[in-house]
Structure formats: C-alpha cells, structure tokens
Amino acid sequence: MLASKIRDPMRHDRPLGAHVKKLRKQNGLTQTQLGDALGLTFQQIQKYESAKNRMSYSTVVKIAHYFGQSVDQFLAGVDDFNAIDPKNRQATGPTRVIPLLFNFGVQELVMNYVTLSLHEQEAVADFVKKMSSKQEGLAA
C-alpha cells in the first residue's frame, strides 16, 4: 500500500502538468509535436499533463527551455507554486518556496546566510522581518 501511495501524483504534479498543457496550447502545439521536439512520445506528454507521471527535473528544464524560459520563469507560471496567504504574505506550504530557490539572488543570499554565526543569522532574520513589516505599512 505504501508503494502505491508513493507513486500517486502529489497535489503539485497536477498544476505543473496543467501549466505544460497551457503553454503547449498557447503555442498551438499538439502533444505529438511537443513530444517530438523534446524527444518524448505524445503518450508521455499526455501523462505529464494529466499528472499520471511525474516530471523529472531534467524534463522540467527541457520543457522550460523549449518554451524559451528559465526554470524559475517556468515554475513561476505554475499556479500552485504562487499561492500566497494574503493575511500573512507567506507561502501556504513549503514547496511553494521552491521556485524562489532558482533565483540567483536568493541562492547568493542563502549561501552567504549559512556562513553567518547563529547570532548573526538571528540579526539578519530580525532585520528582514522589520523591513517586511515596513513594506506592509507602506502598502496599506
């Protein structure tokens, strides 16, 4: 039973597949045409779009580049990854932060952050919280 649960599509697979389908249709492509361009069968494209199969990272990269997008641009278009709770301006789930990690500025920030002492990390976190609350005050 556990093995079948692992193979079941996760809730994030469906929006990812829907995004591929939306891009494919916006570009006037059939599943066969997209599959041929990516070296895949139309059945595989169909399975990705319907979330019957999960896409590997390399497939996401191929699809993003085919449509002339970086991976972060591609993932930013996936509705599920962009859901933000408007009350606290935070992602409503940890996987919604993933697209941000493909942004070079965020990567550089994280790489520098982890070199700091715990005390320095706490100071940075406090500073960012204060800056964020100031921005909220300006937006209100």
Image (spheres, rainbow, N blue to C red):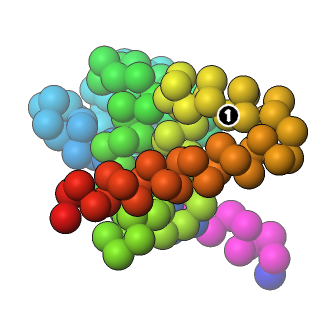
Q: Is residue 90 left or right of residue 54?
A: left
Crowd around label 1: few <14 · some 14–19 · many ≥20 (10 Å):
few
* Quadrant housing residue 7: bottom right
Residue type marked 1? Val
Q: Looking at the image, is 47 positioned above or below residue 6?
A: above
Task: Tell me, yes or no, whether the highlighted magenta stretch contains residue 124.
Answer: no
Provide residue 22's location: percent of width, then percent of height: 23, 45
Q: Looking at the image, is 86 positioned above or below residue 72?
A: below
Name the residue: 31% across, 59% down.
136
Provide residue 42's location: percent of width, then percent of height: 38, 38
* Quadrant housing residue 73: top left
Question: Which range of residues does the magenta coloring cover?
Answer: 2-9
Given residues 28 and 19, the one toward you in this image is: 19
Provide residue 4's location: percent of width, then percent of height: 73, 72
Given residues 3 and 89, the one toward you in this image is: 89
User: Which residue is tagged 1?
Assistant: 110
Name the residue: 83% across, 47% down.
119
